[in-house]
Image (cartoon, coloured by chain):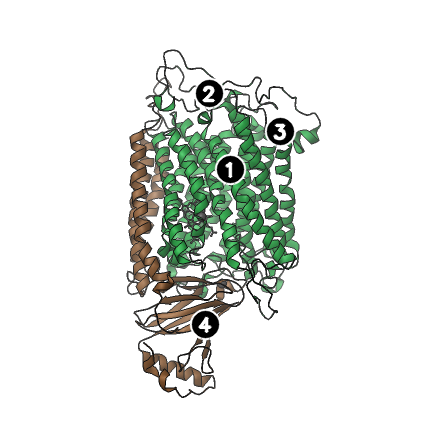
Chain colours: A green, B brown
Amino acid sequence: MSHDQIHPAPRNPLTRYIFSTDHKVIGVQFLFSGLIFMLLGGLMAMAIRWQLGWPWKPMPILAKWLWSAPNLGGQMPPEFYNKLVTMHATIMIFFVIIPILTGAFGNYLIPLMIGARDMAFPKLNMFSYWIMWPGFAFLIWSFYVEGGSSEAGWTGYPPLSTMKWASPGSLNGQTLWLLALLCAGISSLSGSINYITTIVMLRAPGMKMLRMPMTVWALFITALLQAFALPVLTSGLLMQTLDRVAGTNFFSPVGGSVGNAPGVVGGGAPLLFQHLFWFYSHPAVYVMILPAMGIASDVISTFSRKPLFGYKPMVIAMGSIAGLGFIVWGHHMFQSGMNPALAATFTVSTMMIALPSAIKVFNWIGTMWGGRVQFTTAMLHAMAFVSMFIIGGLSGIFMAATPVDVHIHDTYFIVGHIHYVLFGGSMFAIFAATYYWFPKIFGRMMNERIGWIHFGLTFVFMTGTFFFMHVVGWHGHMRRIPDPTVYKFLSEPGVVWMNQFMSVCAFGLGIVQVLFVGNFFYSLVLGPVAGPNPWKANSLEWTTSSPPPHYNFETLPQVFHPPYEFSLPGSEDDYLPQTSPLPPNITLDPIMA
Amino acid sequence: MRYWSLIFALAALFGVGAFAYAPFSADWWLPNPADSPGRAVSTSGREIDALFLIILWLTSAVFVGTQAALVWAQYRYADRLDAEGKPARPARYFHGSQRLEVVWTIIPAAILVFLALYQMETWANIKFRSAAPKTPPLAEVTGRQFQWVIKYPGPDGKLNTPDDLFTVNDLHLVKDKTALIHLKAADVIHSFFLPQMRIKQDAVPGMTIPVWFDCDRAGRYELACAELCGWGHYKMRGDVVVHETEAEFQAWQTAKLTEQGRSRLEPKGDDAEGGKP
Ligand code: HEM
Ligand SMILES: [Cu+2]
Ligand SMILES: [Cu+2]
């Protein structure tokens, strides 16, 4: 397929910056909306920690804005706490991490890294961004309807979520929550179709699949995951919507009722929703980590000035994570009442999925081994990704062992695991990617010194915030409870101290992000001009100007070799762009040939 | 620059330190009696704790190994410039090693498969219905917003007869005797969680799920709800009282029945006390 014409950028600012079909503009739009929602989700997290550190302590100033129960004297109502945990997770997962990794970086990078002028379906791409907006609107609106926003957890299990009187949030907020998720799902689905097609069809001459950067591989596999798993979540969400608004009974048992309300006809099964939900949402956790792994691979190789260790094993590992990802969903349901014999098989597949993760960790360290490690802010975040992901992967093994999961399921141990993979993993990768590609996207360098301070403080506070979650978790601290001190075993001084320590660190973690935001906007305007290839990296996006022109490349690049040819012995520079032919008398490592 | 590796080393040390301290403090460790934090009170608890420890040792070894390698790579291979501003040392050029890939695939795979198979028996003992004790149930426990309604068979040993005893958030059992519970939910999903006995099972509307456990130490424990079930989820707490002897349990039951205004029914001959295994 030839795609060789150059189109000039549209002149009309409306089609140029807002309703744009340019993958770069759409990527930036996803980035900015994601960052705004990250702010909202982060503030919610701090409110959660306020309540957990000092249960029922009146919240100064904010209280009268946040909940309409003035008679409580500033105390947080428990249902509001449930709204906070629900919406914090919903926002961070579906409106921050997935849109930033796939929507922002996926959109921005895929065409540039494979040498295409744009996505295969630019209008579908524009649609994938704008369909997020009804989602945003439903989400915000849900706070203002009677009963307030959803409070059934980000997992939205029925019957809590389907029976209107089960909790205030199930009155109206849950329907809006479902609609918001459906919009986010449609966005991801149309995005993933676009990414798959673009990567399969629009690679530049010479860009064989096995010459693609790991970021592209990761986004490709992620898109396949989304395309095959999302329809199942979508049907689950639609069934729940129908249960709520059309009186169907997919998930209501016979005669189910809440309080003194009359029973429903029923005949459905609450566990069915859990199967449908996790059949998507387990692959979804890999949607949140595979792009992060790809980003970390590229950043670590560039700043070790050394080829990526084990390119093919890394690709195979990602493929097997994706494949196995479809047969492990039951590990979220070990204690759900699902047949325990079935759980035994899910254990084996879950244990096996830790294997490719381990292989990747070894390969990242192998990449640094013998290199010339440069401690740029992007590299620091990528190394923190490795360090933190190790912890998240190892805690996964505890939960994969079903008997241990009996004890730690639905406790803070799980919350610790989630945050080591999602904050330590996905978020650190998002930071790494931002520091790494900011010069390409905006044409200016970010301030490294502020970046270092931001990194150091984030790393320290992140450890302080999330590490003890494992400890209180194996001590039995349930998740999603606003007041642990109801229980004697959670009122012990050690537990109370750890809860307060985590809260203080969480506030610190939130506050130091000001440095990131400040650095971002300061550099946007005043950062030194970057030039096309400030990091001396090899992949195609660095061969065009920063920011790239509307059509990305003056002439479509010709690709000669994989993107990791750093420090080639005998070559003058310590890097060799994918578009530069091999210097004479130099041969590639046979592994890569 | 290479001193950035220190911050990574310190974070890892912090983790190791916290884990090393935890077993020596009852507040920080698995929920066990304060005077013997190393010892769980139930059979499944002891099996789970043993497994937990095996995994903790294995993962700690991997944790220390990988973090040390990462920190060493940062420190040893940090880029340094010579007097002319050129790299003091070139990076080595290689793309990987098939042999290493095979080694670090096979070893973790073996460990993981071992763990998966090794833990199966404990799981079967705790959850497989075929492993359930063949005794009449101690009680039927129903989770509802926001309390645990507990129904004991009463003196006749049979559920759903007029002498059944009802309590709310008050579960009584006898030391060293396996208690079998029929777990139900009346409205939404709850989760029956006995932290000290390491038992957790979701209660699902429309299902009756058998749950069994024992306790070798008389005393008071706590019953928690572990599944978000609405605004009052956090306070869906129950007491668990483990009686020293069967007689003590019976005395409690009789007193409770009287208190509720129902006299103890005459036991029918074949259902007399001895009938219970
Ligand atoms: C190394 C491989 C991993 C293993 C063996 C593993 C295992 C598990 C298991 C068994 C659970 C269920 C625990 C329970 O609820 O009782 C779980 C929960 C979870 N995992 Fe992982 N995991 C791994 C990697 C990841 C990664 C890479 C991510 C995301 C980036 C992730 C995100 C999550 C989340 C979000 C949950 C909790 C969902 C919830 O209940 O709210 N995990 N994991
Ligand atoms: Cu999972
Ligand atoms: Cu509950």
Tell me the crowding category of disc 4: few under 14, some 14 to 19, or many 20 or more residues within 10 angstroms, Cα based: many
Disc 4 is placed on an element classified as: loop
Task: Give a yes or no on whether discs 4 and 1 share a subunit.
Answer: no
* Quadrant, the N terminus of chain A: top right
Of the image marks 3 and 2, the number of the one nearer the N terminus: 3
Q: Which residue does the image show at 52% across and 55% down from the upper left?
A: A272
* Secondary structure state at the residue bearing disc 2: loop
Marks 2 and 1: same chain?
A: yes
Q: Amino acid at mark 1?
A: Leu
- In the rendered image, the vertical position of residue A119 relative to residue B45, given as above or below: above
Looking at the image, is mark 2 or mark 1 nearer the viewer? 1
Alpha carbon separation for disc pair 4 and 1? 49 Å
> Circle 3 is placed at which residue position?
A22
Picture residue at 64% right of the left edge, 39% below the top = A130
Q: Earlier in the sequence, mark 2 or mark 1?
A: 1
Amino acid type assigned to the residue bearing label 3 in the image: Asp
Instruction: Tell us which disc is closer to us: 4 or 1.
Output: 1
The dot on residue B169 is 4
Q: Please tell me the numbered disc located at residue A578.
A: 2
- Specify the amino acid type for callout 4: Asn
Task: Give x and y (percent) for residue A31.
Answer: 57, 36
Chain of residue at mark 2: A
**Which quadrant, please, contains the C terminus of chain A?**
top left
Q: Which residue is mark 1?
A: A224
Numbered mark located on residue B258 in the image: none
Tell whether A555 sits left or right of A300. Answer: right
Q: Is mark 2 within 8 Å of ligand 1?
A: no
